[in-house]
Amino acid sequence: MSAALGGRTAAGRAALLRVAAGPGGDGEPDAPARSCAAALVAGDPAAACRLGSRALAAARAGGVAALPRALELLAYGELRAGRHARARAHAEEGVRAAHAAGQRNLLAHHHAVLALVASLDRDAAAVACHAGAAQEIADRHGLAQAATLAQWALARADLARGRPAEAAARLGPLVGTGPRRGHFAVRMLAVPCFVEAAVGAGEPGAARAAVAEFAEWAARGLDPQAPAQLARCRAMLLSAGDDRPAVEARYAEALARHDRAGGDFERARTAALYGRWLRRARRTAAARALLRDALVAFERCGAAVWAARAAAELRATGAAGTALPGGVPPGRLAELTPQQLRIARCVAEGATNREVASRLSVSPRTVDHHLRNVFARLGVRSRLELARLVDHAERTPTAS
């Protein structure tokens, strides 16, 4: 572990993979859990899930005390492998097991996993509930990893709902180099979200240092998704300029790397961002193809909140018959452009026009113009009616 996270990455990773592939410590009860942790750090989520299942079986046979830790490792493995429903199931059981065993530190980690999974398919309240539970315990016990994951989950929920400035504010200190930086083992995993947030908030310069460090992380080979995410980050930074061929080359590289690494959710995020950039470049046909791919992939991996955003972008290209997932009625929120939808959500949360303008980095006059169009398109006459409509529509796709 010291070598892999220190400076001798290749040697450390090779040693960790030997631990993961070894005989399991001659029957030691903790050996499967150690092997699972080794596979996680070495960047082999498939092995981590296999070894985590073995650790869970050993824990069930050995008693209550070992169960929360085994469930935590397996939940992280499933999360890294992109199997979000399995991660949720293990973390939910982990919450119950940690409560029963009085293991509050592990309880924080399970809530952090649940917050991350909820940021894909649940409403903002569910994310905040789990993230808040994790953060409360983390603050009391100094658990930097759980705190980092909780803030990452909240930021990812902000991104999914078109609030990049809030996401950037959450993640900036965690991925930076100051005293509030995130946990060493997971802070780099949040960098792609920070880059998307910073670029979306109109502050690409804030992300350049993080991308430079992320490039070093990607080169270590400890995260199979990192090379594709790095290409996506570089594409987003380039999108602030005029070099369109370079942007396209980076996005194409990212998609190709995703195809080799696997993972529906991350590939769908890249396709959605690429499609949105193409739409703004007025290349509608190419944008539609990518946004359709993203929508299908988000739906396939159960990321309902992200699918709703992709559907809204797709409708903005003029694609006929594209409704928001989960039963939002055509002709209502599905008819809004992405910018109108962002403004409607902010207003529904109680923000004034000036606060919305500050949040989205536009002028109050622009907000007023879009809001009048939102009222006309949705057939509402007051901010209260708009809040009720948005609340109903946002709850419908995530009810379960």
Image: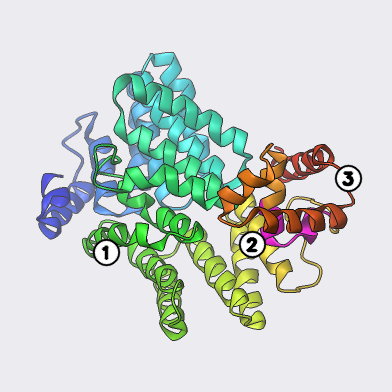
Q: Residues within 10 Å of mark 1 (few under 14, many from 20)?
A: some
Image coordinates of residue 328 in percent, x first then y, are: 79, 51
Say which of 253 and 51 sits in front: 253
Left or right of residue 119: residue 321: right
Mark 3 falls on what kind of element?
loop
Residue kind at label 2, given as amino acid type: Ala
Q: Which mark is residue 215?
A: 1
Q: Main secondary structure of the magenta part?
A: helix
Say which of 321 and 73 sits in front: 321
For disc 3, the marked residue is 381
Eye-nearest disc, 3 or 2: 3
Magenta stretch encompasses residue 14: no
Q: Residues within 10 Å of mark 3 (few under 14, many from 20)?
A: few
Instruction: Inspect this view and state whether residue 204 appears.
Output: yes
Eye-nearest disc, 1 or 3: 3
Residue kind at label 1, given as amino acid type: Ala
Magenta stretch encompasses residue 341: yes
From which residue to which does the magenta span run? 332-342
State whether residue 56 is above or below residue 225. above
Residue at mark 1 to residue at mark 2: CA–CA distance? 28 Å
State whether residue 250 is above or below residue 325. below
Image coordinates of residue 261 in percent, x first then y, are: 39, 66
Name the residue: 16% across, 51% down. Answer: 4
Residue at mark 3 to residue at mark 2: CA–CA distance? 28 Å
Residue kind at label 3, given as amino acid type: Arg
Residue 219: name its quadrant.
bottom left
For disc 2, the marked residue is 310
